[in-house]
Amino acid sequence: ASNGNVNTMIHGVTVHGIQFLDDRTRPTTYYVEDSGVGLLLLNHPKYAENMRVGVLGLGAGTLATYAQTGDVYRYYEINPVVVRLAEGEGGYFSFLKDSKAETTVVTGDARISLEQELSQGQAQNFDVLVLDTFSSDSIPVHLVTREAFALYLEHLAADGVIAAHISNRHLDLRPVLWQLAQEFDLEMVQVNRSSSPGDSGFPSEWILLARDPAILGIPAIKSHAISFSGYNTPVKLWTDDYSNLFQILK
């Protein structure tokens, strides 16, 4: 959709990206600079130092606005229409084209793609791995199981961070991610953002997970972070054999 000065990518009721035509490199929606993922990318120790970023779920490609020269941004996207739009078909979105990073889009199911890369000896060594496939009302459960996370961690640098976008009207993914954090001994915090009138960002909820707690203790992140100390949940660990969407309905 286009309304003069912005182009918007919408699928069903989910907004997948907004680009300002007079300010094309400005991050928007769930990805603004004070969102969980924005704070993480801008304050990560590897920022502007040949950072490797993986993103499951392409949308309009908004996160590519954070890339600096020498960075590698690798997107995984199952929907070919989304890929064509993000790569510039119709002239609507130019986040990928304008990006300073070397950007690659891998089409197909993200988990299968990551499994194939690993079996070919191509661990991606991501400094940040963004999981952005959970905002619609039918989430791909196979991307948030124990087996999926074992795979992500194989592709994650030692001081890497997984950033999961959990803004969702219907589902609360915190218990699922908390159980995964327990299983893999990951530090976990939540960064919420509320919107104010006239800003270009949406309210958002991001979960950040890391093997090394120090990286989530960076002041710019810590000052916005909600701790899970004392948190507990009856929701069991999700695996490829077990998941229960009813338990996480809001």
Image (cartoon, helix red, strand yellow):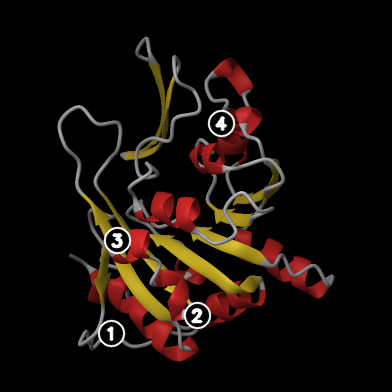
Left or right: 70 as drawn, with respect to 230: right
Q: Residues within 10 Å of mark 1 (few under 14, many from 20)?
A: some
> In terms of secondary structure, where does tag 3 sit?
strand
Query: What's the amino acid at mark 1?
Result: Val
Q: Amino acid at mark 4?
A: Phe
Question: Which residue lies under the disc numbered 1?
Answer: 235
Which image quarter is the N terminus in?
top left
Vertical side of 180 occupied by 34: above or below: above
Q: Nearer the viewer, mark 2 or mark 1?
A: 2
Image height check: is 25 above or below 186? above
Residue picked out by circle 3: 191
| Residue under numbered circle 4 | 95
Give the residue at mark 2. Answer: 212
Q: Are marks 2 and 1 in contact (CB under 8 Å)?
A: no
CB-based contact (under 8 Å), mark 3 and mark 1: no
Q: Amino acid type of disc 2?
A: Asp
Q: Residue furthest front?
A: 219
Q: What residue is shown at x 41% (from left), y 70% (from top)?
A: 216
Q: Tell me the CA gap for discs 2 and 3.
A: 17 Å
209 sits left or right of 111 in the view: left
Q: Which of pointers 1 and 4 lies earlier in the amino acid sequence?
A: 4
Q: Residue at x 60, y 63 (%)?
A: 127
Residue 215 pos. (x, y %): 46, 71
